[in-house]
Image (cartoon, helix red, strand yellow):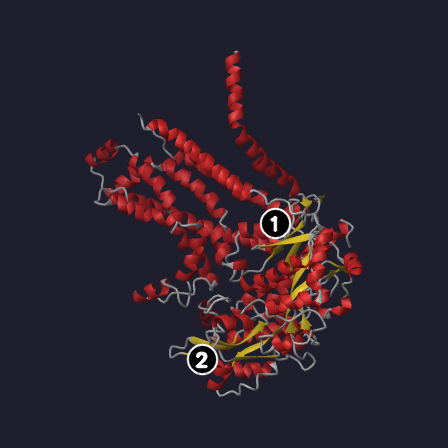
Amino acid sequence: MKRIGRREAWAGFIFASPWAIGFLVFMAYPLIASIYFSFCDYSVLKPPIWVGLDNYKALLHDELFWKTLKNTLIYAVIALPAGMATAIILAMLLNTKVKGMAAYRTFFFIPSLVPQVSLAILWMWVLNGEHGVLNPILKTVGITGPNWMGDPNWSKPSLVLMGMWGVGNAMLIYLAGLQDVPTQLIEASELDGANSWQKTVNVTLPMISPVILFNLIMGIIGTLQVFTVPYIMFPNGAPEHSTYFYAVYLYDNAFRYHKMGYASAMGWIMFLMILVLTVCSLRMSEKHVHYQGT
Amino acid sequence: MDRSAFTIPVLAIAVLGVLFESEQLTAPPPPDGKVHVKYWEKWTAFEFDAMKHVVDEFNKSQDKIQVDILSVSGIEDKTLMAISGGIPPDVVGLYGPNVTQYADNHAVIQLDDLCKAGGIKEEDYIPAYWNIGVVRGHLYALPSTPATTALHYNRALFKEAGLDPEKPPKTIDELDAMADKLTKRDANGHVIRTGFMPGEPGWWNWAWGPFFGGKLWDGKDKITINSPDNVKAFEWIQSFSKKWGASALQSFKSGFGQFSSPQNAFMMSQNAMEIQGVWMYNFIHMYAPTLDWAAAPFPAARPDLPNPTVIDLDVLCIPTGAKHQAEAFKFLQYVESQKGLEMLCLGQKKITPLRKVSAGFIEHHPNPYIKLFIDMAYSKTTISTPKLGIWSQYNDEISSAFDSVTLMTKTPKQALDDVQGRMQPILDQYLDRLHLRGEQ
């Protein structure tokens, strides 16, 4: 390498070093250390002691581990498609040519800017079974609303409902994707006599399929790690652990029960699950996702 | 002349000025020759002010140590992180139920020798409070502010329901009968007032078993949550849901405001009788000064379990790795003196953990029932959290069983059998690992 090239390379490394050091110290080291801790009895305060596969074996027999996993999967299976469908529908509506569209777009995006903790506190009052805002609204159309947060059958749906509130970010990404759909393809399908539904299913959705895939993967990661809102709204996963999610149980093990080794094992199981689901999504997408120019 | 020629120098001076000012503001104060003891406490508002007053008095009383008190939220977690990071405070104010978990994790130091040398003696304290700081025969925490619980009842609602406000219930059967009279429904059948709810305020759901004579563990290695006495207590809890409807009660309770607010169910006369601690007076005084209320010993479930009360305690500990342990203990000595504890406990309007009470402590105490709360500390039926390092997890499990029982999705026996089945292996593993480390 020429001297000037080497100097530039060094300068580059030096400029990148704050990030590299931060990554190594705060991300890579804890990540790798947690593999080791998952095989240890470790409370953070005392030195770790190797216990082999004990933590993983205990997890297999931990009823609450399975319960939180089941809760999380049920939540993901409902919240992910519901959130994606809502975001796509909103994005399509906001992609039409209507007067004052900028205001509508802002209006639908703003809720996603509300911090999670404030959102949780706000919705606790919206969903309150006795004095909440939602039930009187439902009553006006003849529906007797449930005790959303106190009834184990309704606590998870209430979280899904709240999840809709934050679809603004996904909606924005879909909107960007929709604006990238070539107009000549839409016009060609119109010439072929396609109606709105056919245009959406056969042209628009295939053309934004890479965006859908991106949001799907981000959604899988996000819903499987759901934490802040249930942690604030449903202490101890009440009622009856119906809102006790995997990430909350992991946190409790790590920071409340001081079982950092056990929590590390849970973390790695979650990582593997997300990895498998992401790889499956990518594999399945090969047939259904269309990239422009390919 | 070009105006932009001035812009950069002016901006540069402004930035330098801000940097200089920020350095001035954040610079540590000049050394005063004193040892600074860092003290983290969980309290806020008037409770914090009471301890701040004690700290100020200590700082004034000598010129070698300066205690710097800081109110810290989520103190259990933050202290643990600070200890593991090697930067703990010198003194920390924790909750009584934390002590075993902290001691088992070597997060706080043993105080036996320091107390012996410093003249802090077990016999000066009410036994129930001193014992909370003792784990496996060693002392790890000293009492700060203690509490006992009693039945608080709304005298006005008693009168309205045709009950004699001078005769509170003495047995659980009487409590049930009075609760029935005090509970009200509207024309649509919705519950609009409860006489008594075992889940309100919900801080001692674990304690109902011991109120009925049950034990939460055998003191060694067996969880005993599904013992007949505990099952009986949970059957009593479920009787309220059977009587008034699980969802009706759940829905009514969901409308209760926060404890420390004027919307508190007891202060709003939504709940006529409630188990509460000595601190309740402070909040009634603050948010509902006109409330006509009284306190009495909680009704007994059995004649051999008279005057049952939950022993609640805040404690002071010295974290492992604290830099100024000797100075921290000097401060603890000051707080633990009769003068220090009475100053603190009177400031927080609570009782004192000491056997000896100075003349005037009761007379000057604003809580009209303070004598009752002091007497309760000597009750035969004192109930405190078990000394288990897995207590927070065990407590969570009992809370979940409590939910199942009040929602009537499980029978009391089934719910407690489930807790037993879950917690016994967790305790076994916990004890095995202590053994593995040679700590048992």
Chain of the residue under the numbered disc 2 shown in the image: B
Q: Position of residue A179 (x, y in %)?
A: 29, 36
Quarter of the rendering containing residue B350:
bottom right
Residue that numbered label 1 is attached to: A254
> Looking at the picture, which amino acid does disc 1 mark?
Ala
Q: Position of residue A59 (x, y in %)?
A: 62, 50
Depth check: B351 or B20 in front? B20
The residue sitting at 55% across, 64% down in the picture is B46
Depth check: B126 or A290 in front? B126
Depth check: B74 or B185 in front? B74
Quarter of the rendering containing residue B402:
bottom right
The residue sitting at 52% across, 21% down in the picture is A11
The residue sitting at 57% across, 31% down in the picture is A21
In the rendered image, the quadrant that contains the C terminus of chain A is top left
The residue sitting at 59% across, 66% down in the picture is B415
Is disc 2 surrounded by few (<14), some (14 to 19) or many (20+) residues within 10 Å? some
Q: Is residue A86 left or right of residue A242?
A: left
* The disc label shown at residue B380, or none: none
Depth check: B26 or A51 in front? B26
> Looking at the picture, which amino acid does disc 2 mark?
Lys
Q: Is residue B3 left or right of residue B80?
A: left
Q: Secondary structure at mark 1?
A: helix
Is disc 1 surrounded by few (<14), some (14 to 19) or many (20+) residues within 10 Å? many
Q: Position of residue B248 (x, y in %)?
A: 45, 72
Chain of the residue under the numbered disc 1 shown in the image: A
Residue that numbered label 2 is attached to: B184
Q: Position of residue B389 (x, y in %)?
A: 68, 57
Q: Secondary structure at mark 2?
A: strand
Q: Are marks 1 and 2 on the same chain?
A: no
